[in-house]
Image (tube, grey):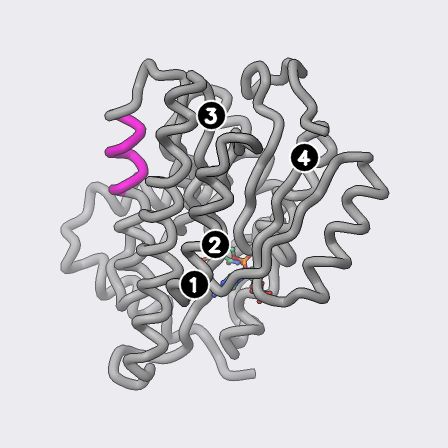
Amino acid sequence: MVRIGITTQYGRFMTTALITGATAGIGAAFARRLAKDGRNLVLVARDTGRLAASAAELSKTYGVEVETLAADLATDTGITAVEERLRDAGRPVDILINNAGFGNKGAFLTVPLEAELDMLKVHVEAVLRTTTAALPGMQERGRGGIINVASVAAFLPRGTYGATKAWVVSFTQGIARDVGGSGVRLLALCPGFTRTEFHQRAGMGTSNIPAWSWLSAERVVDEALRDLARGRSLSVPGKRYKAIVAVSRLLPSGKLGGVSSKAARTYRTD
Ligand SMILES: NC(=O)c1ccc[n+]([C@@H]2O[C@H](COP(=O)([O-])OP(=O)(O)OC[C@H]3O[C@@H](n4cnc5c(N)ncnc54)[C@H](OP(=O)(O)O)[C@@H]3O)[C@@H](O)[C@H]2O)c1
C-alpha cells in the first residue's frame, strides 16, 4: 500500500523516503523522524541484520511500511541496486537522503589509497548517481526533496574527507539552483561533531573534543528538515557551527588549512 495525499510541512503527497546509512547515527534519526511523520521508508545499509531489526522496530512503532535494501555503496553493484529502486516509477520515492558515509583516521599517505577511493565512491559517486536516478521522476511529479549529507569539514580544507564533502555542498547547491521552481528541493546538510558511531568506527578518539561542540543526531535532523521546508539549499545545524562556517568563508583557504590540520591533531587514538 502506498500512502498518498497526506499534507505535511514538506509538501503534499511526499510519502516515501529512501535513506542511505539508515541503521545508525544521523541516518537512523532521519528514519525515526520521517516514520513518525507518517512516511514509508526504504532503508539502505550493508548490515542485513541491523536493517531487518530497524525495519521491524520502525514499522511496529510508527505503523509505516518499511523496505530494506542491503547495498554497499562503495561498489558498483550496490549503487546500481539503489539507482534501480529510485527509478521504479511504480513505487515513487519522494525524499532521498544521501547520508551513508565514514571517516578514515590519519593524515594523507598514512591512509591506504583503496580506503580513499572507497570514500570517493560512497561520498561522491553514489551521491551523484542516486541524485541523477531520483531527480527525473521527482521533476515529472512536480515534487520531491533530496538531502545530501555533507559536513562542516566541507569548509575547512583538509584531506579527502573535507574534499568529498566540499563536492557534496557545491554539487547540491548548484543542482538546487538548476531545478528551482520545479517543486523539487535539494539541501546540503553540514553537521559539526555529532554523537553517532562515526568516530568509533573510524578508530578516532573523541575524549578531547569539547562538550559544547557535540550535536545530537535528532537536532541535526530537525534543523535539516526545517531548512528543507523553508526552501534553503544549505543547512548548518547549531549557532556555533553557523558562525564557524560564516568565518571560514571570510578567511583565505590557506589559513583555513592550518586551522583544520590543528583541529585534526586533536583526534586521539583512545
Ligand atoms: N558524526 C559526525 O560527527 C558527522 C559530522 C559531519 C558529517 N557527518 C556525516 O554524516 C553522515 C552519517 O554519519 P554518522 O555520523 O551517522 O555515521 P554512523 O553512525 O557511523 O552511521 C553510518 C551509516 O552508514 C552506513 N554505511 C557506512 N558505509 C556504507 C557503505 N559503504 N554502504 C552503505 N552504507 C554504509 C552504516 O551502515 P552499515 O555499516 O551497515 O553499512 C550506517 O548505517 C556521513 O555522511 C558523515 O560523513 C557525520
What secondary structure prevails in the magenta region? helix
Q: The disc labelled 1 sits on which kind of residue?
A: Thr
Distance from label 3 to label 2 (Cα)? 20 Å
Tell me the number on the disc at residue 77: 1
Mark 4 sits on what residue? 40
Mark 2: secondary structure: helix
In the rendered image, residue 158, in percent from the top left (x then y), is placed at 26, 65
Q: The disc labelled 2 sits on which kind of residue?
A: Ala
In the rendered image, residue 127, in percent from the top left (x then y), is placed at 37, 49
Q: The disc labelled 3 sits on which kind of residue?
A: Gly
Identify the mark nearer the N-term, 1 or 3.
Answer: 1
> Which mark's residue is nearer the viewer, 1 or 3?
1
Q: The disc labelled 4 sits on which kind of residue?
A: Asn
Report crowding for label 1: few under 14, some 14 to 19, many 20 or more residues within 10 A (C-alpha): few
Distance from label 4 to label 3 (Cα)? 14 Å
Mark 3 sits on what residue? 144
Tell me the number on the disc at residue 81: 2
Q: What residue lies at 41% left-to-right and 77% top-to-bottom? A: 105
